[in-house]
Image (tube, helix red, strand yellow):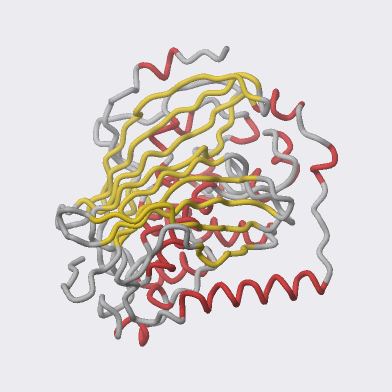
Amino acid sequence: MLDTSDLDRWIGVPLTGGDIVEDIHVNDIRRWAQAMQNPYPLHHDRAWARESRFGDIVSSPSFTVNTTWGHGAEPSIQGVVPGTHMLFGGDEWWFHGPRIRPGDVIRCEKMLFDYTQKETKFAGPTIFSRGDTTYANQAGQIVAKQRSTSIRYLAEEAAKRIREEDTVDPEWSDEDLYQLEEEKMDYYKSFLDLGHDRRLIAKKGEKIARRPIGPHTIQSFTTEWRSCLFTVWGATNYDYEGTESTTETAGWLPEMTKDFEGGKVDPARTDGLYLGPSRGHTIPRYAKLIGMPRGYGYGASMGAWVLDYVSNWGGEWTDLKHSDMKFRAPALTGDVTYLDGEITAVEYERKSGRPLATVQVSMTNQLGAVLAVGDVTALLPSETAPESE
């Protein structure tokens, strides 16, 4: 069993800091949509967005995770457990209404919620810890609350269990890649055809168009990382205002630890991608060191793909209310990720009288292996009544 004694002192302890220093810029929103491979025009096309419900470009709900340090996972990585690494285990979201717009300033409150320890095939003794991040804008409005799950495990033990056959990227023929691009275009057309109209009808058993993403590459994972605002030099406020955070000293392997003293000269040494915990995503040598067979994707991106998938289907008049996704495995280089959705319930929200659709989402790779599963609840528009943000 892993020693969790240092985690106990953090449960329920408020954390501040890790906020993005400047207000949100329209190009931050565009860059996120681009990195998440999400061409919904509301998030990048000003002419299209000005004809929308919002009157200009606004963020996707998934962009919320991009307005704090560490994808909102920081509060779930409190307490020191030596020799461990961390993977995303899932996210639960509650959305409260206002979209993030250019000019907004987002501030967060965080705390470790709870943790459990289990035996896993992946790495033996493994800690599943959950942390809460509440996002508020400059007007004091709660934008969303995120409950992030971190999987903390002994990297050395996971590395022993890598299967050699999983260390090689799959190969795709030109015909396979052409067909995949056609499938992507079919998916994009499925939500672009809705235009500015309201999605008024949703039926139990209705399936949402399949969304393919990939094949994933070192380049695509790097693009995702570089769209995260906290990776920009000087963009994040690390003043914890009298509180403390142990995320940077959580017990990482020496090879996965940032150089804060050197970072005073060269900020790249605290960047995380070149030196630090994130280098395993894009450098196969370090991926294997922490138990991954090859370069692997970001849990924050997986969560974003799901939120974008349901939000795109609903269109600009639909508001996401809740999402609860459990991650089972990461996307690996060379793999293709598929998102499939099915409406499992349609009810009515008592307060607004609007339809509330529950979409069951599954995420798989080209071999059919399940990467993530869960439900997203979306508040559909009424036919005549105006909806506020």
Q: Residue at x 68, y 46 (%)?
A: 369
Q: Residue at x 30, y 45 (%)?
A: 145
Q: Quadrant of the C terminus?
A: bottom left
Q: Nearer the viewer, residue 245 or 7?
A: 7
Q: Nearer the viewer, residue 340 or 149?
A: 340
Q: Quadrant of residue 27?
A: bottom left
Q: Nearer the viewer, residue 383 or 259?
A: 383
Q: Quadrant of the N terminus?
A: top right
Examine the rendered structure and indicate whether residue 239 appears above or below residue 50: above
Q: Nearer the viewer, residue 114 or 32?
A: 114
Q: Measured from the top left, where is residue 172 in percent x and y? A: 81, 64
Tally the marks: 0
Q: Residue at x 59, y 76 (%)?
A: 186
Examine the rendered structure and indicate whether residue 203 appears above or below residue 369: below
Is residue 232 visible in the rendered image? The answer is: no
Is residue 124 visible in the rendered image? The answer is: yes
Q: Could you tell whether 336 is left or right of 264 in the image? A: right
Work out which residue is located at the far front of the displayed protein and give it: 204
Q: Measured from the top left, where is residue 262 in percent x and y? A: 54, 42
Q: Residue at x 28, y 25 (%)?
A: 12
Q: Quadrant of residue 118?
A: top right
Q: Measured from the top left, where is residue 229 in percent x and y? A: 43, 57
Q: Could you tell whether 385 is left or right of 224 in the image? A: left
Q: Measured from the top left, where is residue 135 in percent x and y? A: 28, 49
Examine the rendered structure and indicate whether residue 271 appears above or below residue 32: above
